[in-house]
Image (cartoon, rainbow, N blue to C red):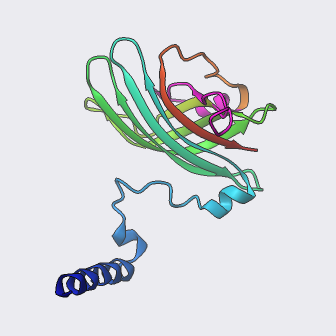
Amino acid sequence: MTKLFNSAVAVLFGLALLSSCNKDEALDPQLSGTSDVTLEERARNASVSGHVELDSVGGRMQRYSFTAVQHKNGTVKGEFQLFDILNDSTTVVIHGDVECFTIQEDGITAWVGGVIERGMVDSVSLVGAEAYWTVVDNGQGGNADPDEATEIAYGFEGVLADDHCAEGLGTFVYFGPIVRANVKVKP
């Protein structure tokens, strides 16, 4: 009985400690996800989100997660996180802001673009470079076709993210196997 009481006190103390910290203190900025895009915002407005794992010939692998919401005034707020293992085993970790997305007339395809806020390849900073990708939400459940996605193309300067959101620059076909994709496109 004493062990149970001590465990309960420890849990309550831990919860009290966590609740006493402000949000910025409780979250590691390197690991904070997309807490600025709330579920309520996504329910009211057009949004895109998901997690994708891709594997390609030659040993390259990409894993990325993203979420973004488009407000009624047209502004977009969101984030993406990418882990890219290149063919030479170099690992690239990128975090960025989603700047735009366009949901196509089919209601399931989204062109997404953003700007890198943190990330490097070898000793070259990618901060400020643009990134873009395409996802297809084929529905939920066992009877739905698997969701589809392209790799995130990144490292470009200019307005490629905006161009992609407007015209679909990255509507290329992904030739490697999609290990896992669970995306949500909500018009």
Quarter residue 92 falls in: top left
In-image side of 65 versus 24 (left or right): right
In the displayed structure, 37 sits above or below 55; it is below
Pick the residue in front: 42 or 182.
182
Residue drawn at (66%, 63%) of the image: 40
The spot of residue 72 in percent (x, y) is 77, 56
In-image side of 85 versus 52 (left or right): left
Pick the residue in front: 163 or 175.
175
In the displayed structure, 44 sits above or below 186; it is below
Residue drawn at (50%, 25%) of the image: 151
Image quadrant containing the N terminus: bottom left
The spot of residue 56 in percent (x, y) is 42, 17
Residue 139 magenta-drawn? yes
The spot of residue 66 in percent (x, y) is 53, 43
Considering every residue shown, the one lying at the far front of the view is: 1
Residue drawn at (27%, 25%) of the image: 90
The spot of residue 43 in percent (x, y) is 70, 58
In the displayed structure, 53 sits above or below 42; it is above
Magenta range:
136-165
In the displayed structure, 183 sits above or below 54; it is below
Quarter residue 32 falls in: bottom left
Asked if residue 113 can be seen in this view, the reply is yes
Pick the residue in front: 162 or 92.
92
Residue drawn at (40%, 77%) of the image: 22
Asked if residue 156 can be seen in this view, the reply is no
Residue 69 magenta-drawn? no
Image quadrant containing the C terminus: top right
